[in-house]
Image (tube, coloured by chain):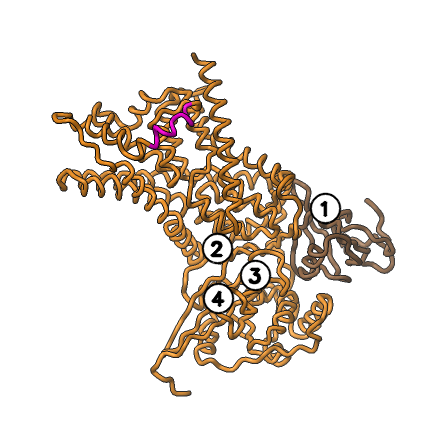
Amino acid sequence: MGTVSSETRSPHTVALVGLPNSGKSTLFNALTGLRQRTANYPGVTIEPLIGHFQRDGRAIVVVDLPGIYSLSPKTEDERLAIEFLHGRLPGGPSPERLIVVIDATQLERGLTLVSWLARLHLPTALVITMIDELKARGGILDTEEIERRLGIPVFTVVGRKGLGVEELRHSLLRWEPWGIPLLDISPDASIEERYEWARELSYRVLHLPRPDIRSERIDRVVLHPVAGLLIFGLVMLVFFQTIFTVAQPAMGAIENAIGWLQGLIEAWLPEGIVRNFISRGLLNGVGAVLVFLPQIMLLYFLMTILEDSGYFARAAFLVDRLLGTFGLQGRSFIPILGGFACAIPALLSTRVIPSWQERLATMLIIPLMTCSARLPVYTVLIAATIPPVSLGGMLSLQALVMMGLYLLGAATGLIVAWLLRHTLLRGAKAPFVVEFPPYRLPTWRNVLGHTWSSGRQFLHTAGTVILVLSLVLWILTEIPPVEPPPETPPLEAQRLQLEGSLAGQLGHLLQPVFAPLGFDWKITIALLGSFAAREVFVSFMGQLYAVDREASGDTLREALAQAIPLPVAVSVLIFYVYALQCISTMAVLRQESGSWRWPLLAFGYTFALAYGMSFTAYHLLQWLLY
Amino acid sequence: MPSLSTAQEIPLSQIPLYHPVVVSRYSGDHSFIERFRELGLTHGTQLIVCRRAPLGGSIEVECRGARLGLRLQEAAMIYVRCAHTQNGNGKL
């Protein structure tokens, strides 16, 4: 054993490479202990994740790259991985070594990837995963023979159980010399020659396993023309039902907690700017961010279970026909589904869509899916203005309206996708191919880990923007301070402050623009406030009607019921179905599309839709009702 | 069901279920074809169409121990021949 110096040496960088779905991410988790998504769905790792581990002053940085098939990229995430492997990723370190992860049940294809990677001339180790699955199906793998033939170390791991990981970690920490793979084929060999080479090698080292009968049996039901569609419908029903029924109490609890804190602050602190800032600025802002956390985390919790189990690959195969008619594809399904919680993680997850045109079309319609930020707007306005009658004794009109709003957004989204794919975004660069992984039981570690990281991602990306804009909004309502005439009741003073503030002035200024939709100046201000994030509408209406609320002792709902007639409420609701009023979404769209053109287009078309549809709905209802 | 002779090249999209076939040539966009080959659908590879998507539009293909879902219009870029040397009636 060599002596280890006490000084910390500069860390070594190792890249984890493999085919999509080879078990890379599970290995990455096991190696570094970092929480990260590992999905049983091809191409789900959307950006290189960096983790590290260290011992005795030696640090190893591990980079988990998106899955690749060769060194010629077809998709954005493949391009990213390959640029990194060549050391050409701006700001990224160059990999010193490669860990190539191969699924033992997919040896031939994995070895073909090794033959491509050999061109990089980097010290390499093979890690064989799913060896337990191979053995269970009667397969035998001679890893020593692979070592001999390729001249590189081979490790076998069961990442889900952590078996074999320690040996790999040791080898890295001791920085044992690894070989550069030696292949008896030309570096310029064709794909066919590489597959031939891999086939010969795997013939020598692998006793073939029996076919995966269990997955085939499940698929016979899950992909059955009748049973398959029923199961899909059922899964979606349970999915959405869980998101809404389970998240509601948590959202209510967060709202109550914020309200309780506000009450505490207002009771303890003397009246003035500090109290006002903490209670109305800060706590409202924090509440606006936190309230969506339960739904977003729940959505990703369920989505990770569906992905890791292998069902999502089947679902993509199933719905491809449907989405295909609108110019999208099976893989657009997951991001669109994600859009029902929050557009930000959904936009990021579109990187799994290989063709740029299909990906962009998907990104541009995601804002039309009813995200959780619209839910409080819908809830408050529907509860306040739609009569609580039941239709046929079963369905309540309010629930029906709510469902209609969700459907309106989704249906319009599909039509817009079709239009985009037949005008601006024609064609495709890569075929639609779904790889069916075997069905596997999701592990709690992966599911909870990913749920947590998606929550963190939301807080980080959207939360910061929402909080800052909430504070800006609060400032806009506080300046300039309006000095009320002597002996004005506090209520009247607040109303004057609000009307005279910059926000009030802006609302009045833009009022003529929104007047044709039936909006009054308060709605216009709340609408502008929504650009921080849509749910600000509610906290803003709360602030704007705080005056009325304190006057009559009514809740916000009752205040709105009195102030907003039905046609106006419907007009506002439809405006919220369509309008892209979320600056964080636009920022992410800019980042993902590489130009401001697309977020501006998204903003423009959604605004036009919102304005046109609200205008129509308002005047139609006015004519019908009065 | 069309009868498959070894000489005939037929688009993969038109192959009946469970007929072993061999990839013989491609026709279509270069990057599409390269991806098919990278996935293991190389020239001379044996494959079987083992399922049609419940809503249609796609097929599931077994090749090199993996299962892939392909769209019919894209599977039409891959031309195959019957894998049997004698006649094309061999069912699995």
Q: Which residue is mark 4?
A: A92
Q: Main secondary structure of the magenta part?
A: helix
How far apart are labels 2 and 3 at the CA level?
20 Å
Q: Give the residues drawn in magenta, as a range.
A: A506-515
How far apart are labels 4 and 1 at the CA level?
39 Å
Q: Position of residue B13 (x, y in %)?
A: 75, 48
**Quadrant in the rendering for residue B25:** bottom right
**Quadrant in the rendering for residue A530:** top left
Q: Output the chain of dot 4.
A: A
Considering depth in this image, is A449 or A81 the residue closer to the camera? A81
* Discs 4/1, front: 4
Residue type pointed to by label 3:
Gly
Determine whether A55 is above or below A69 in the image: below
Considering depth in this image, is A386 or A327 the residue closer to the camera? A327
Density class for disc 3 (Cα within 10 Å; few <14, some 14-19, many ≥20) is many
Identify the residue shown where x is 42% and y is 58%.
Answer: A445
Chain B appears in which tint? brown
Task: Give the secondary structure at mark 2.
Answer: loop
Q: Which residue is mark 1?
A: B73
Considering depth in this image, is B73 or B2 the residue closer to the camera? B73
Q: Are marks 2 and 1 in contact (CB under 8 Å)?
A: no
Determine whether B80 is above or below A511 in the image: below
Density class for disc 2 (Cα within 10 Å; few <14, some 14-19, many ≥20) is some
Is the residue at mark 2 from the same chain as the one at mark 3?
yes
Residue type pointed to by label 4:
Gly
Q: Which residue is mark 3?
A: A67
Identify the residue shown where x is 49% and y is 40%.
Answer: A367
Is the residue at mark 2 from the same chain as the one at mark 1?
no
Determine whether A535 is above or below A617 in the image: below
Q: Which residue is mark 2?
A: A442
Chain A appears in which tint? orange
